[in-house]
Amino acid sequence: MIPRYSRPEMVAVWSPETRFRIWFEIEAHATTRLAELGVVPREAADTIWAKGKDATFDVARIDEIERTTKHDVIAFLTHVAEIVGPEARFLHQGMTSSDVLDTCLAVQLARASDILLGDIDRLLVALRTRAKEHKYTITIGRSHGIHAEPTTFGIKLAEAYAEFARNRARLVAARAEIATAAISGAIGTFANIDPRVEAYVAEKMGLTPEPISTQVIPRDRHAMFFATLGVIASSIERLATEIRHLQRTEVLEAEEFFSPGQKGSSAMPHKRNPVLSENLTGLARIVRGMVTPALENVALWHERDISHSSVERMIGPDGTITLDFALNRLTGLIENLLVYPENMKRNLDLLGGLHNSQRVLLALTQAGMSREESYAAVQRNAMQVWQHRGDRAGLFASLLKADPEVSARLSVSEIDAMFDDFYHLKHVDTLFERVFRPEA
């Protein structure tokens, strides 16, 4: 991933230095267990660890060897032999390249998952804090982009909290799905290596043994992992899109923090644009774009082919690095989000109380009018409010009171009582208890 959208901790997981260190540990642990089983000399295993544990593997030298071998694992083993000496011949006994590559990828994806889980935890803290801050900040809810009924800004953020809590659970499951080791040799039959070696390496590398592999770990595991990243990215976009809409000039109920000296446009000095939210929308598209290649990697030929390799060399680093950056950017956005309750109240009142139409509809049905007649009566008055181009304050209630069908069923005081906006918020505590009680 390009540096602009990268954070150092996640980048380090995918560096060549990290990869070669993991490769060495896989090979060395396998050799240690082979020595315990009497397959290779114990002295050789000890020498490999002694000379390799603090060694710096020369990336340029490995690349140089690979230009001749055209094989990355062989190039690495050749370089290790240059460091370790003759005992290196006992490395890779009964193993195949995929044992190293797939087990290493599992380690990297598990480490990346741990970083992403930490990212989500920080985002959850930010969402919880701001949700509780605006628990009763009343605002209009919208369906199809049109005013519906009141909610609170805290409920909006509590919804996002619940969604990312689900995403966290998904990622925990995806991490478990991906964290398997395969040290089973060519075709996965253990013909030339003892299954106890696989179990030993898996334990040492923080993984579990793959129950049954071909020459590779089954790619349905990887498909599920990247699908989970795609779902998380979509949740990021959903929240970012909400903020973008709320920042529109005509709405302006919330706004990204605009720092001193920040510029919104090279041409128009007045601009304050939702650039972070828009950036998150774009980054989400990138992460989701990696899901389909991961799904297509599942169907390999027979016991293996190499078509998955080039895909994973890109989507592994780029998917996790991009999502790590996006989650952290979203956390900062939420922490610093500017919220304008007065604008929320102004927008709530724009349609002169039309958001209470359902209350009137229900009251008429309870007063004896059929639902069809009630709907027609409320709608014809509501449409007059829509068509009115002046001040709409109190207009809907006035029209209802003047309507003979409505006034025959409902008194003036009953109609007035239906325009208490906080009626819609009576179960806010219940919703917050549902969302936040598990954390207690």
Image (tube, helix red, strand yellow):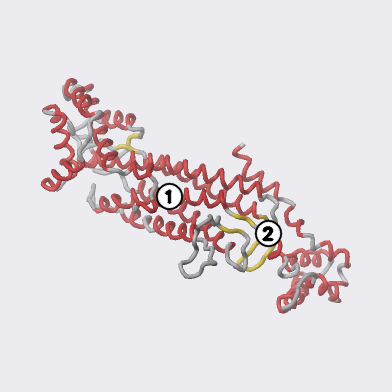
Residue under numbered circle 1 = 325
Residue 150, above or below 207: below
In this picture, residue 68 sits left or right of residue 272: left
Residue drawn at x 66%, y 48% is 431
Residue drawn at x 41%, y 39% is 176
Residue 139: image tag:
2
420 or 362: nearer the viewer: 420
Residue 217 in the image: state x and y as whole percent.
Answer: 30, 43
Residue 157 in the image: state x and y as whole percent.
Answer: 60, 52
- 3D distance between C-alphas at marks 2 and 1: 31 Å
Residue 33 in the image: state x and y as whole percent.
Answer: 24, 25
Which three-letter amino acid code belongs to the residue tagged 1? Answer: Phe
Residue 258: image tag:
none
In this picture, residue 402 sits left or right of residue 305: right
Residue drawn at x 21%, y 32% is 193
Residue 330, above or below 105: below
